[in-house]
Image: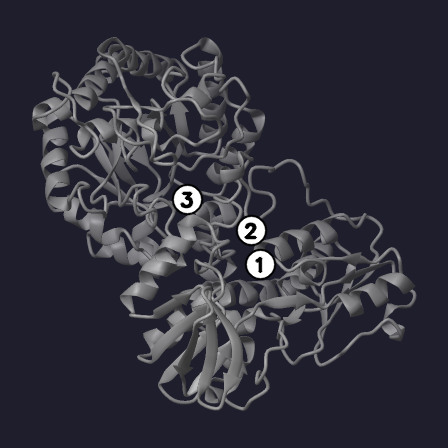
Amino acid sequence: MDKYSRLFEGVKIGDMKLRNRLVMSPMGTFNENYDGSISQEQIDYYEARAKGGVGMIIAEAQYVTNKTDPWIESMTAVGTDIQMKGWARMAEAVHAHGAKICLQLSCGLGRNAFPFDSRQMVSASAVPSFFFPDQLCRPLEKDEIKDIVESYRNAARMALVAEVDALEIHAHGGYIIDQFMTPIWNKRTDEYGGSFENRMRLVTEIYQAMRDEVGPNFPILIRMAADHDFEGGRTVEESIEIVKYLEKLGMDAFDIDLGCYEQKQWIVPSIYTGLGCMADAAAAIKKEVNVPVLNSGTHTPETAVETIENEKADFIMLGRPLIADPDWVNKLRLEGPEEIKPCLFCNEVCVGRLYQNRTISCAINPHAAFEKKYPMTKTELPKKVVVVGGGPGGMEAARIAAKKGHRVTLYEKSDKLGGQINAAATPPFKKRLQDLIDWQERQLNKFGVDIRLNHKITEESSELENVDQIIVAVGAKPLLPKIKGIDKENVVEVISAHQNPEFVKGDNIVVAGGGLSGCDFALEMAMEGKKVSIVEMLDELAATELMDNRNPLLFKLNEYNVEQLTGHKVIEFTDTGLTAEKADGTKVELKADTVVAAFGTQSESELAESIWKKYPTSRLIGDCVEVAQIGSAVRNGFFAGWSID
C-alpha cells in the first residue's frame, strides 16, 4: 500500500472534501429510462463503484435539454422533477458508501450526434455532420442558445435539491459547447462567433447561470481536451488561453483529456496509445492553473501514482477500469494490485455496444451495468463440473462455477493455461491480455479448481462420465487456406510466429493477411526494427474493427512505416517471398526473409460436436462455437459457470 499511498490522500476541490484522489470518469451507459430519467440499473451501477472505494463519481452526461440533438427528443424527463428525483436517488446511493457525486451536464453532441435517424444535426455553424459529412448541420438560433443557457441554470437548481456534490460542464470531444469554443466549427458572425471573447460567450453564460444558482462555494468543473489532435483543431497553446480565462471566471477544476472525433483515438483510448496516455496533456494544463486538474486515459495503479508523484495531475480518473472491476480502489488499498481484474482497454463491449444503441457492459465483467441481474449466490448443492479447455472462456467458466461452490476440474491439452492468448499477448502493447490470464489463474487457485494440464479430452474420455455439467471450450485453430507453397519452410503461421520467435528469420517480413492478428504482428515486428509489409485482399486493413481501435492501430502502422498493400490477393508463396494479384489482374512479387500467414482461425468444432453428441447437456462456449474476440469467450464462460444451480 505504501507504494500507492499518494492516491489515498484526502484532497479537496474547492470546499468539497474527497477521501482519495481516484475519480470515476463519466462514460455513457445507455441505461437510462426511455424518458431520460435515471434508471434503477444506473443507480445500482454507480452504487457498486462508490462501494468499491472511489472518492468521487462523475456520472455520465445528464442532458439539460432535449431540444438539440433529434435523437434525444424522447427524453421528456429532462429539466423536470422526474429527472431531479432520479439524481437524488443516485446521490443518496453514492453517499451511503462515503463517495461524492458530480453530474456531468450536457446540451448534446451536435455535429457528433449518433446517426440513429436521418434528421439534420445542429451545431454552432453550418459545418458538416461528423457521421454524414455530405450533410451540413443547422446553426443554432440565438433564442435556442438562450434556452440552452437557461436549461443549465435549471439543472444546477435541481442538482442542489438533489444534494449533488459538484457539477461538470461537458465541453470536450468536439460536442456542442466545444463546437462554439473552436474556430474550425464556429463560423458565426454574431456575438457567439469570431473573437476569442465571442467564442467563449456560450460557456461563460452557462457557467454564470450555474454559479448564480449554486453560489460561490459549490464546485463547478469543466471537461475539455488540451489538444484536438487534428489539423485545424485546438492546440495546447489555445487551450492554455482558455483555461486561464475560465480559472479567472471562477472554474474550480479542469478535467483534461485529448482529442475529438476527427482522429478518434483519444475519446476512449485503445491499447495502441499506451498506458497513462493523456497524463502529459494534463501536465501541460496543470502548469498554468492554480486549481485542481483531473486526468483520465488508460491508467493503471502504476501510471496513476506516477502521474500524481510527478505533479502532472491532482486526481486520477478511472473509466473502463472501474467498469471491469468496481472494487478497483478498495482492492488496491486493502489487498494489492494483483487482485484487481485488469481492464483490457479493448473497447469491445463498453464501446462497441454503444454503436448498436445498446446498454454497455464489459468484455470481462458481465455484471457491469447489470449489477443485480446475476447474483453470485453460493450453492447449497455442489455439482461436479468438468471444463474442457483452458483458454480465457474455459477459465472464466471454471472460476465462476467454483466461486459459486461447485467442484470443478479443468482439463487443458497443452502445458499452460491461456489458449491462443499466450500468442496474442506477446506484443508489448497487448500485455494486458496476459495480465488477465494471470489474474484468472490466480483466481482458479483461490477457489480450488483442480487444474489438469497436458491432459487431452475427447468424447471417449472417462473423465466426462458421471459428472453433473460439462463445459466445452476447446477454442479454435489456425486457418490455412489451400494456397500454393503455404507449407514452405519460410512461411510461418502467425500463432506459431508469436510462440516461436526463432522461426521468424531475417529483417524483411511480409505478413499475409491484414486482419487484426496480422496487423498486430506486423506492428510488433516493425517496433523491433524490422522492415514489414502487409498484404491484404480487402481494400482496408482491420476492416471489421471498431473505429476507436482501428484508427490508432493504423496510425501506429504508419508511424512505424509498415507498407500496406490492400487489394492484393496472395496467390502463391515462393522460396523468396510471395506472389500477389491486384484487382486488375496485375501480379506483384514481394521478397521476404520470412512470410507470416495470418488468415485467421476456425472453430475446433469437430471435437466440440463430438462431445455434445455423446453428452447433449454439455454447454459449448467460445471459439469452438463461433470465432470471436476475447470478450465473447469470457462472457460466455461467465454465463456457463453462473447458470449451474
Question: For the point 37% across and 53% down, which residue is it?
Answer: 551
Q: Looking at the picture, how far across and down is residue 587, in whole percent?
A: 44, 75
Residue 325 in view? no
Question: For the point 54% across and 38% down, which residue is it?
Answer: 356
Say which mark, if any, is on residue 56: none
Where residue 397 sits, quadrant-wise, is: bottom right
Between residue 411 and residue 142, name the one nearer to us. Answer: 142
> Where, quadrant-wise, is the N terminus in this rendering?
bottom left
Label 1 vs 2, first from the N-terminus:
2
Q: Looking at the picture, how far across and down is residue 160, in whole percent?
A: 35, 16
Q: CA distance from mark 1 to mark 3?
A: 20 Å
Label 1 vs 3, first from the N-terminus:
3
Q: Looking at the picture, how far across and down is residue 96, in whole percent?
A: 48, 29
Please give the residue where the numbered disc 2 appears in the rendered image.
363
- Mark 3 lies on a secondary structure that is loop
Q: CA distance from mark 1 to mark 2?
A: 7 Å
Please give the residue where the numbered disc 3 appears in the rendered image.
319
Between residue 377 and residue 397, name the one nearer to us. Answer: 397
Residue 131 to residue 480: above or below: above
